[in-house]
């Protein structure tokens, strides 16, 4: 028989054994979390438009009718929500059956699958009440997805307008449409709406800003009041000997002074500009636009970190730069944070809040424009680095 001493020793060992078991389980859980995190940070890749179809027969019908030409599909803008990334696929060419989709960041298999968002029924380009051609998208702090629908399809072929330009809001939680803003009263036939920014004022009211490159304007829409107006920018924004109304980039930054600013520039303009958004919302822009300085060369604004940092690259070059808008706009403050692989260029940078990282969307879109992509453009959602 075991002695009473041995019995008490065994009892004393129980807490230690229990602690060892807990540590073991915790280590296993931590390892699983680490593996899951590493999986979520891997690049997400696809070619052309690999959509999720309800059945193979539907895909065949779309393909035979010319409504689906995989190589004609290209994602240009993105926004991350939890474990998914929403992408905008402007209908630059015919045969793109979906203009707004989401892709899982949980990599499965060799190629990602694009799922129409919010559903297939709103993707018909001939339906003016649906989504005709989404050119930009933004997810705000209230988990609302705002999309800019220019209403024009086949812009690289024979442009056709199927609906008035609009901004549509969806709940990311439910996929339900919350709002549709008709922008037709703020534009002219020559308007080219390109980029979208959403901001909440200090009293919690949402405002939408849209760049109109053709009219040298920024559209301002008060969501609560359901009204908008067009702010015509001064001639000075077309600074430079060869400046033309090509691409009007806009980006919202929150600076250390406590004010929000809209940073903007034309692609071919030689200078960068800014304006406080409270001035923009009241329409009192006279004398309020600030010339931040000269650009070293043509810049493509890619996005922000939801704070004071703006990300950009130079036209045709793979290096992605970060500029903190709290610092002077000079070359010495431009920091290279990423270099795209050969043949790829970045078109968008967005925040991945769940993982405290920045994501970027890359593609070989120059080949897409020149019709030299074979089976389709290569598209990649990659990790830029930690948020700062």
Image: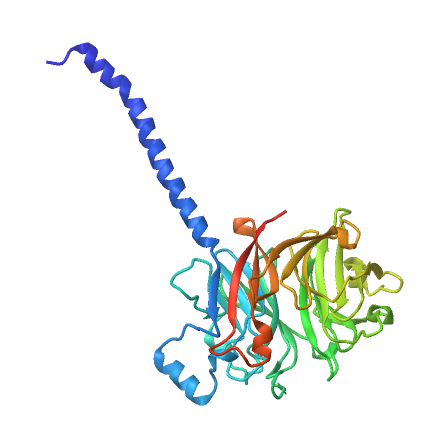
What residue is drawn where x is 66% and y is 68%?
Answer: 316
User: Going by the image, does 166 lie left or right of 258?
Assistant: left
Q: Nearer the viewer, residue 374 or 185?
A: 374
Considering depth in this image, is 134 or 228 the residue closer to the camera? 134
Residue lying at the far front of the rendered structure: 342
Question: Residue at horizontal 74%, vertical 52%?
Answer: 325
Q: Is residue 76 visible?
A: yes
Residue at the farthest right position: 287
Tell me: residue 204, above or below residue 365.
above
Q: Quadrant of residue 244?
A: bottom right
Q: Residue 75: percent from the left, percent from the top?
A: 55, 71
Which colouring convention does the figure follow?
A: rainbow
Q: Quadrant of the N terminus?
A: top left
Percent across and percent down for residue 272 are 79, 62
Residue 149 against residue 83 in the figure, above or below: below
Q: How many marks?
A: 0
Relative to residue 249, is residue 163 drawn left or right? left
Residue 187, position in %: x, y? Answer: 74, 79
Residue 224 visible (yes or no): no
* Residue at (64, 75) in percent of width and height: 166
Q: Nearer the viewer, residue 201 or 340?
A: 340
Q: Quadrant of residue 343?
A: bottom right
Kindly indicate the quadrant of the structure image that contains residue 329.
bottom right
Residue 182 place in picture, x, y as percent: 66, 76
Which residue: 70% across, 51% down?
A: 308
């Amino acid at each position: 028989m075991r002695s009473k001493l041995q019995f008490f020793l065994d009892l004393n060992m129980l807490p230690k054994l229990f602690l060892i078991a807990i540590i073991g389980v915790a280590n296993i859980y931590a390892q699983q979390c680490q593996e899951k995190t590493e999986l979520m940070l891997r690049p997400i890749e696809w070619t052309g438009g690999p959509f999720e179809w309800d059945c193979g027969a539907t895909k065949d019908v779309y393909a035979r009718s010319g409504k689906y030409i995989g190589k004609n599909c290209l994602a240009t803008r993105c926004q991350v929500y939890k474990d998914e990334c929403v992408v905008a696929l402007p209908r630059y060419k015919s045969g793109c059956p979906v203009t707004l989709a989401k892709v899982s960041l949980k990599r499965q298999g060799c190629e990602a699958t694009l799922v129409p968002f919010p559903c297939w029924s709103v993707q018909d380009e001939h339906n003016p009440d649906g989504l005709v051609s989404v050119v930009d998208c933004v997810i705000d702090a209230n988990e609302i997805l705002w999309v800019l629908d220019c209403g024009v399809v086949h812009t690289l072929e024979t442009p056709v307008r199927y609906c008035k330009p609009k901004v549509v809001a969806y709940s990311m939680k439910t996929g339900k449409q919350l709002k549709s803003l008709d922008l037709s009263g703020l534009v002219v036939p020559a308007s080219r709406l390109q980029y979208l920014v959403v901001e909440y004022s200090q009293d919690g009211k949402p405002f939408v800003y849209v760049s109109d490159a053709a009219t040298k304007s920024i559209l301002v829409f008060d969501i609560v009041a359901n009204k908008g107006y067009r702010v015509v920018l001064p001639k000075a924004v077309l600074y430079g000997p060869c400046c033309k109304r090509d691409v009007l980039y806009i980006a919202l930054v929150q600076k250390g002074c406590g004010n929000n600013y809209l940073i903007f520039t034309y692609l071919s303009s030689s200078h960068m500009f800014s304006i406080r958004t409270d001035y923009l919302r009241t329409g009192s822009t006279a004398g309020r636009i600030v010339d931040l300085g000269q650009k070293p060369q043509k810049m493509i604004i890619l996005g922000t970190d939801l704070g004071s940092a703006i990300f950009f690259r130079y036209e045709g070059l793979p290096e992605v730069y970060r500029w903190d808008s709290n610092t002077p706009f000079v070359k010495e403050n431009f920091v290279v944070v990423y270099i795209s692989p050969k043949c790829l260029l970045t078109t968008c940078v967005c925040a991945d809040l769940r993982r405290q990282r920045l994501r970027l969307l890359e593609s070989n879109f120059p080949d897409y424009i020149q019709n030299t992509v074979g089976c389709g453009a290569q598209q990649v959602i990659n990790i830029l680095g930690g948020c700062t």
